[in-house]
Amino acid sequence: MKVTSAYANKMLKKLNEEKEYWINKEKESMLYTASTDEEPVIPDYDYGEVSSTLEQIEKRICRIKHAINQSNVNSEIEIFGEKYTVDVLLVRMAQISKRKNVLDRMRKQMPKTRVEDGYYMSRKVFVEYRYVNYDLERVKKDYDEISKVLFEMQMKLDEHNQTVEFDVDIE
């Protein structure tokens, strides 16, 4: 069957919900408590059925994930003239996101900040200040640039996930 990555991920979500249903059913039904002076209420539970169903679901999940991985390794996306396979793009986006977070913290720093010692009654003789040790304007510019690159990567990946089809053997 031909699917897009977005569709395949929705299939995985549905399968994981179904798997969770069967796991919960097993957890709630595999044991029961009964009093010796009354008729037991035995939950509807068939070990063989549950095991078989979970195995089938897990095999389908493996096939879908494999197809997604194959597509990610073989599909390319061009961003600002540079081509990335989807798997590399995902790694690169994670790296850029980390760097963006660092730059975000740096760009929010004041050039000069008074250092508090934590004691209001302190009789400190000297006031201490903390200074940024970098070009604040350059950090702000780099943050804007990295944000633009990350946004473009996300948009291209979203478009790819919605439009590029690949084969999945779900049976």
Image (cartoon, rainbow, N blue to C red):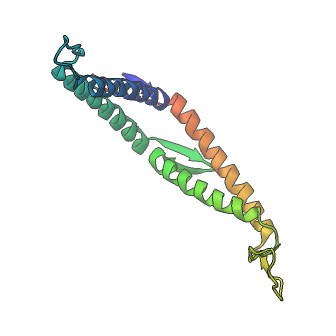
Foreground of the two, 65 or 126: 126
Residue at (81, 66) in percent of width and height: 137
Q: Is residue 119 above or below residue 42?
A: below
Q: As drawn, is 116 to the left or to the right of 3?
A: right
Instruction: Give residue 56's position: percent from left, percent from top.
Output: 24, 25
Foreground of the two, 137 or 35: 35
Q: As drawn, is 92 to the left or to the right of 3?
A: right
Residue at (61, 50) in percent of width and height: 81
Q: As drawn, is 36 to the left or to the right of 23?
A: left
In this view of the protein, can residue 41 be seen by the observer?
yes
Quarter of the picture holding the N terminus = top left
Instruction: Give residue 15's position: percent from left, percent from top.
Output: 37, 26
Q: Is residue 80 above or below residue 9?
A: below
Residue at (77, 76) in percent of width and height: 115
Foreground of the two, 109 or 117: 117
Residue at (21, 20) in percent of width and height: 34
Instruction: Give residue 117's position: percent from left, percent from top.
Output: 75, 77
